[in-house]
Image (cartoon, rainbow, N blue to C red):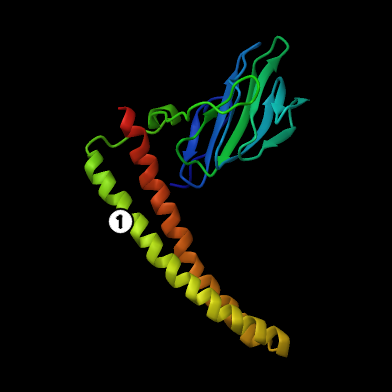
Amino acid sequence: MGFPVYDYRTDVRNVLVTPQIRSRFLKMEPGQSAQLHSHDLGHEIFLILEGRVEFEIAGETEELGPGQMCVALADQPHTVRVLGDEPMTMYLSVTPHIHPTHTPRTADGERLPHNFVSARAYDVEPDMQVTVSELLARQVHAAELLAELTQTCAAVQQEMGNQLKAALAEGDADAATAARKAMWEALYPVYKATAELADVWNALAPRVNQ
């Protein structure tokens, strides 16, 4: 049946929400602005599709129009305001997308309490049949698994790193390639387990307020 195709003129919503990335189309009306905020972990990319806006990022302002994009890096306070008499539509993505997703800021840029919002705010329907106790158990299990894999990975990085260093010094391309392969094969499951931990955390964290 193919894959989903999204259109910014009709799909004005979150279209992909995972711990690795949240992406959406967003429409704002003339004069509308967003609260100054930052993301503890996420870099946010903005691509303007229609209309004109003024961005403030880390105290600097720029005006953007269709076809232009900008980036707010993790922990950089940012806001946006629609200019002119026409609505603005943009594509945006935040990566990674891990709760708390937003940290509100004062006008002076001071951090306010984290904002743990419902999954529904991102067009995701939470599975309320899974209890908080079960989510906590999953959270602990995922953290323990990550700790085990990280410990194993650290040992492999040290051993194979030494082999890689020796292979490069000797000009042994095959040995260097093999060592790099072993380092990645130990690193890969750590990243997979990190994503699993973030997935459980994203399900658990908003439930505290529900």
Q: Can I make out residue 125 in this image?
A: no
Q: Is residue 63 above or below residue 194?
A: above
Choose between 87 and 116: the one closer to the eye.
116
Which corner quadrant of the image does residue 135 belong to? top left
Q: Residue at x 34, y 59 (%)?
A: 144
Picture coordinates of residue 163, whole percent (x, y): 60, 84
Picture coordinates of residue 32, whole percent (x, y): 62, 13
**Is 40 situated left or right of 49 in this image?**
left
Which corner quadrant of the image does residue 183 belong to? bottom right
Picture coordinates of residue 117, whole percent (x, y): 42, 28
Q: Can I make out residue 24 in this image?
A: yes
Near mark 1 (Cα within 10 A), the count class, few <14, some 14-19 or many ≥20, is few
Q: Residue at x 56, y 31 (%)?
A: 7
Which corner quadrant of the image does residue 54 belong to? top right
The residue tagged with tag 1: helix, strand or loop? Answer: helix
Q: Is residue 21 above or below residue 105?
A: below
What is the three-letter code of the residue carrying label 1?
Answer: His
Residue hosting label 1? 141
Q: Residue at x 72, y 34 (%)?
A: 69
Query: What quarter of the picture does the C terminus occupy?
Result: top left
**Is 143 situated left or right of 96 in this image?**
left
Choose between 26 and 161: the one closer to the eye.
161
Q: Is residue 136 above or below residue 82?
A: below
Picture coordinates of residue 25, whole percent (x, y): 57, 29
